Image (cartoon, helix red, strand yellow):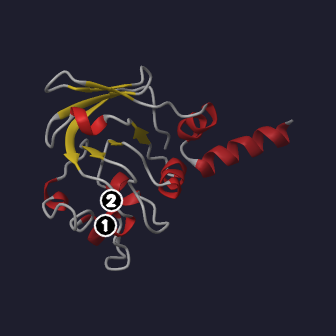
Amino acid sequence: MSFDLNRVIKGRVWKFGDSVDTDSINPYYLYPAMEDLKKHTLESFRPEFPKEVKPGDIIVAGRNFGCGSHRPGLVLKEIGIAAIIVESASRLFLRNSIALPMPIFIAPDIGKIVKDAEILEVDYRNTQVRNVTTGAKAVLRKYPPTIEAIFESGGMPAFARKRYLAEIAG
């Protein structure tokens, strides 16, 4: 399933700080079944998160989001997180998220314009995040065209398959 980078995303914010690690995002070693994992994701940072998060919500975090092991954030996609907007992300977590596809939007000043539970509007095409509650704005960084094509294809496996088929078709 592709991810449409051109649609405007609007949702309620869950704000986190710096260095949100993959063991907290995806505590797979404790809860290997997805349904159990959903009940415990990010609870070490926000105990209320698994019980109160709703499809369409947005995660906002500081620097180094997804640090730690190689675990992808598939559980965030499964619980319906509409967008993740961070000041910076771990390189490996960012790569895994592109492959899913579950984009992590980079907005270096995002922490300055939003508080927990406010409403954000993410407009990737116009490289902007707007706090609907206050009107404050931050700039989003664009992905390179190849990464955008991966999202449009539905993730890395679909992108690779599409490129392979185009290559053999000649």
Residue at 32% of width from left, 59% of height from top?
20
Taking depth in this image into account, of 53 and 109 the one nearest to the observer is: 109
Where disc 1 sits, the SS reads helix
Crowding at mark 1 (Cα within 10 Å: few <14, some 14-19, many 20+): some
Badge 2: residue crowd in 10 Å (few <14, some 14–19, many ≥20): many
Q: Amino acid at mark 2?
A: Val
Where is residue 124 drawn, in percent x and y? Answer: 42, 27
Work out whether 115 lies above or below 128. Answer: below
Q: Residue at x 15, y 64 (%)?
A: 47
Q: Amino acid at mark 1?
A: Ser
Image coordinates of residue 102 in percent, x first then y, are 44, 47
User: Would residue 25 appear left or right of 120 to someone viewing this image?
Assistant: right
Please tell me whether mark 2 sits on a helix, a strand or a loop: loop
**Residue named by callout 1:** 24
Distance between the alpha carbons at the discs numbered 1 and 2: 7 Å
Q: Position of residue 56 (x, y in %)?
A: 25, 41
Q: Tell me where residue 108 sits by quadrant.
A: top left
